[in-house]
Amino acid sequence: GGSGGGEGFDVQSKGDARVAFIGFPSVGKSSLQAKLTGTETEVAAFEFTTLTCVPGTMRYKGSKVQVLDLPGIIEGAAQGKGRGREVIAVARNADMILLVLDAGKEGLNRHREILENELESVGIRLNQ
């Protein structure tokens, strides 16, 4: 576990693979990263707690995996809403993108569909 190297959105790639957590605000990205990597990051009950890319590192079957906790994105991110462009640029350079959803609200919110549309609109092909 531990820090993954760097701050802001320009985070040095470390380890054997890079995974970016993408999701709407307050769906548990920071909590999941803390559980997986031991990285301490601010977790709060309000939206947009994470303002930059927070790297962490975990081990998986002998490999070091860099896990990137990114700020929440919202509909219109690909067009620059919120920090959407910065978040998407980091995700584009990841080896894997993990969509983090609030399963209890997904039926109402359609967050998965919105996230997939945002990423695909900038040429990131999912499930490929």
Image (cartoon, rainbow, N blue to C red):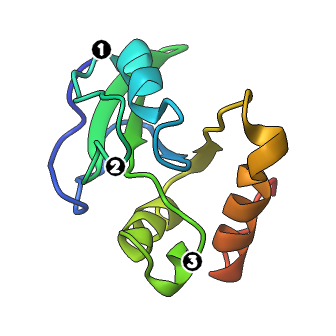
Question: What residue sits right under mark 1 in the picture?
Answer: 38
Q: Amino acid at mark 2?
A: Phe
- Above or below residue 6? Residue 81 is below
Quarter of the figure with residue 2: top left
47 sits to left or right of 123 = left
- Above or below residue 79? Residue 86 is above
Residue 66: x and y in percent read 38, 36
Q: Report whether residue 122 is seen.
A: yes
Do labels 1 and 3 touch, CB within 8 Å? no
Label 1, label 2: how far apart the Cα atoms are = 21 Å
Question: What residue sits right under mark 2 in the picture?
Answer: 48
Callout 3 secondary element = loop
Q: Amino acid at mark 3?
A: Gly
Label 1, label 3: how far apart the Cα atoms are = 32 Å
The residue that appears at 36% across and 29% down in the rendered structure is 45
- Above or below residue 113? Residue 19 is above
Q: Nearer the viewer, residue 97 or 84?
A: 84
The residue that appears at 30% across and 16% down in the rendered structure is 1
Q: Which mark lies nearer to you, 1 or 2?
A: 2
Quarter of the figure with residue 34: top left
Question: What residue sits right under mark 3 in the picture?
Answer: 76
Residue 111: x and y in percent read 71, 52
Callout 1 secondary element = loop
Q: Earlier in the sequence, mark 1 or mark 2?
A: 1
